[in-house]
Image (spheres, grey):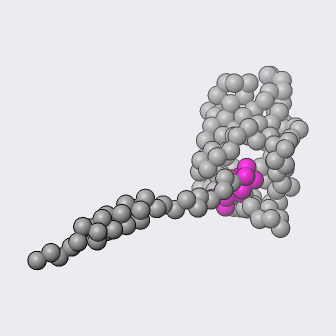
Amino acid sequence: MKIFSPFSVLLALLSVILLGSCSDDDNDPPKSDQELIGSGVAWKFGSASAGGFPVTSAIPECFLDNTITFNYNQSGNTGVVDAGAIKCDETEPQSGNFVWTYNESTKVLSVDTDLIDIPGASGDIKVVSVNSDNLVLTQSVALSGFGTQEVTLTLVH
């Protein structure tokens, strides 16, 4: 007694092959730099350099545990700076809100607060690169005894 005809076996194999080769080809479009910056996930200090030399050891410990969260929204970008567990000044608030903008063509990141102000910094904050794990920023900073240097700050998720 035949249970399966050759045609039904062939049809079953073909179905398995065709259905097995289907995948979710509806990949999300690549995110813009602004969307990556404003992912809503806190950025933490990774490293810093000035003029190509590491300067992380010169940064006070109370800044190293701070977090910065950028929230992207087409109607307006907001953010939160949190002082972390080690505060530089106990009288200052634990966190503060800010508004930010990013220009994709000039790679300039602007924030409306001095909560993330770097002493001696001047000029624009420029985004060197951004991906889902790293945000690399540069800004000119006047360093005592060294003149004005390009400081590079790497933030990580």
Residue 127 visible within the image: yes
Work out whether 21 lies above or below 54. Answer: below
Front-lying residue, 19 or 143: 19
Residue placed at 87% from the left, 37% from the top?
A: 122
Image quadrant where residue 106 sits: top right
Residue 82 visible within the image: no
Name the outermost residue toward the right. 123
Give the magenta part as a residue range: 32-41
| Residue 156 placement (x, y as % from top left) | 61, 46
Q: Is residue 105 left or right of residue 29?
A: right
| Residue 126 placement (x, y as % from top left) | 80, 40
Residue placed at 63% from the left, 34% from the top?
A: 56
| Residue 145 placement (x, y as % from top left) | 80, 22
Residue placed at 79% from the left, 53% from the top?
A: 115
Image quadrant where residue 136 sits: top right
Front-lying residue, 70 or 113: 70
Front-lying residue, 35 or 111: 35
Residue 104 belongs to the span the image colors magenta: no
| Residue 109 placement (x, y as % from top left) | 81, 47
The quarter of the image holding the N terminus is: bottom left
Residue placed at 69% from the left, 24% from the top?
A: 52
Q: Is residue 64 left or right of residue 7?
A: right
